[in-house]
Amino acid sequence: MKFNKTYLVLAMMAVMATGCSSTEEEGALADGSQAGTDASTSGYNDGSMSGSQFGSGSGYNSGSGMASNLGPEFSDPNNPLSKQTIYFELDSSQVKQEYVSVVAAHAQYLASHPNQHVILSGHADERGSSEYNIALGEQRAKSVERMMRSQGVTGGQLEVVSYGEEKPAVSGSGESAWSMNRRVEVGYQ
């Protein structure tokens, strides 16, 4: 049994090393060498957002582990904090420009609530091998983590988990289902 676990770990490492750089985009993000060229560093300090629009924390229960006990700003559809899913393009871990403000809103909220903790759950659609999809889900979650950390969120507030293709949001095959499954979910604890 030990041989099988060792073999599995080695196989996953080999797939991650070769499979993750199968496209130019993935290779650039996997080693972080081009981190400044994607959406992860743009749109933050343009003055379009202030901390007040993300809520004052009234009604927020910092001892709670449930998202339902978060402040009213999380249920206001006009507030970016109400969006807790970040979607991605096929074979990409680059945060789309349309979600930069959503990630920034969560980062600012977390930075102003240092006792709050989130799990960033990375997901992929069903295409590709299980190993590749686990690696891609992790890269997606780490892209969001990097964006949040650059906004002042501490590492202790963030946990990265990858489910790959194992927990689809939508069942089925086809672009409409696949596009909903390429995501990172921001789960408040």
Image (cartoon, rainbow, N blue to C red):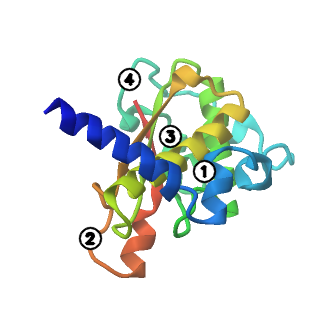
Of circles 2 and 1, the one toward us is 2
Of the pair 61 and 148, the residue shown nearer to us: 148
Q: On the image, numbered disc 2 is attached to which residue? A: 171
Above or below, 131 relative to 182: above
Q: Where is the C terminus found, in terms of image quarters? A: top left
Count of numbered labels shown in the rendering:
4
Label 4 close to label 3 by CB (< 8 Å): no
| Residue at the spot 62% in from the left edge and 33% down from the top edge | 109
| Residue at the spot 74% in from the left edge and 47% down from the top edge | 35
Of the pair 11 and 163, the residue shown nearer to us: 11
Task: Label 4: state its secondary structure.
Answer: loop
Q: CA distance from mark 4 to mark 1?
A: 21 Å
What amino acid does circle 2 point to? Ser
Label 2 close to label 4 by CB (< 8 Å): no
Pointer 2 or 4: first along the chain: 4
Pointer 3 or 2: first along the chain: 3
Task: Label 3: state its secondary structure.
Answer: helix
Determine whether, in the image, residue 53 is placed left or right of residue 19: right
Q: Where is the N terminus found, in terms of image quarters? A: top left
Label 4 close to label 1 by CB (< 8 Å): no
Mark 4 crowdedness (10 Å alpha carbons): few <14, some 14-19, many ≥20? few
Pointer 3 or 1: first along the chain: 3
Q: Point out which mark residue 64 bears.
A: 4
What amino acid does circle 3 point to? Pro
Q: CA distance from mark 4 to mark 3?
A: 14 Å
Mark 3 crowdedness (10 Å alpha carbons): few <14, some 14-19, many ≥20? some
Q: On the image, numbered disc 1 is attached to which residue? A: 79
What amino acid does circle 4 point to? Ser
Q: On the image, numbered disc 3 is attached to which residue? A: 72
Mark 1 crowdedness (10 Å alpha carbons): few <14, some 14-19, many ≥20? some
What amino acid does circle 1 point to? Asn
